[in-house]
Image: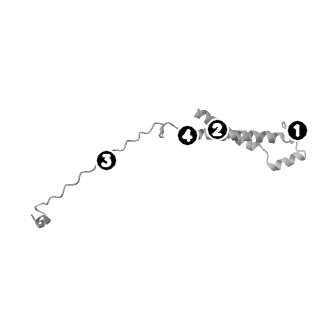
Amino acid sequence: METLIWIVHVLTALSIIGLVLLQHGKGADAGAAFGSGASGSLFGASGSANFLSRTTAVLAAVFFLTSLGLTYFSSHKAENLGVMGTSKEIPAPAEKTPAAPAPAALPVEGNSKAKEIPK
């Protein structure tokens, strides 16, 4: 299902780019009023602008919906996959045991400090 949404998302994005490049700017409408030949087109003088802008609006809505769908799928993954596509094994933390107190240092006979300790 996610692959299908990715395909629709990419095709929609490419279609929006194409439709935006086909549309006229605001200044291009003034040329149609002086007989530039746009009135004889397939959609009429203003029909192509309405058709292209409505189609762009529909494709933009589809693009947003597929974006939301992909966001949903990415946030609800069952397992976290690593770079190679295998699941990561997270080691369990080792239990810490309290360390035994260090034994007191015993005086050594050859040590000068050992002679100073009263017995």
Q: CA distance from mark 4 to mark 1?
A: 49 Å
Residue 11 appears at what percent x and percent y?
66, 37
Of the two numbered discs 2 and 1 on the same chain, state the one appearing first in sequence. Answer: 2
Q: Secondary structure at mark 1?
A: helix
Q: Left of 84 or right of it: where is 111?
A: left
User: Amino acid under label 3?
Assistant: Lys
Q: Secondary structure at mark 3?
A: loop
Which quarter of the figure is the N terminus placed in?
A: top right
The type of residue carrying mark 1 is Gly
Q: For the residues marked 1 and 3, what is the alpha-carbon distance in whole angstroms?
A: 84 Å
Quarter of the figure with residue 12: top right
Q: Position of residue 116 (x, y in %)?
A: 12, 67
Q: Earlier in the sequence, mark 4 or mark 1?
A: 1
* Residue at image mark 2: 9
Q: Secondary structure at mark 2?
A: helix
Marks 2 and 4 sit apart, C-alpha to C-alpha, by: 15 Å
Image mark for residue 40: 1
Q: Residues within 10 Å of mark 2 (few under 14, many from 20)?
A: many
Give the number of the disc on residue 74.
4
Give the mark, 2 or 4, whose residue is nearer the N terminus: 2
Q: Is residue 43 left or right of residue 95?
A: right
Relative to 114, residue 53 above or below: above
The residue at 72%/39% (across/down) is 58
Q: Say which of marks 1 and 3 sits in front.
A: 3
- Find disc 3 in the rendering and name its residue: 96
Secondary element type, mark 4: helix
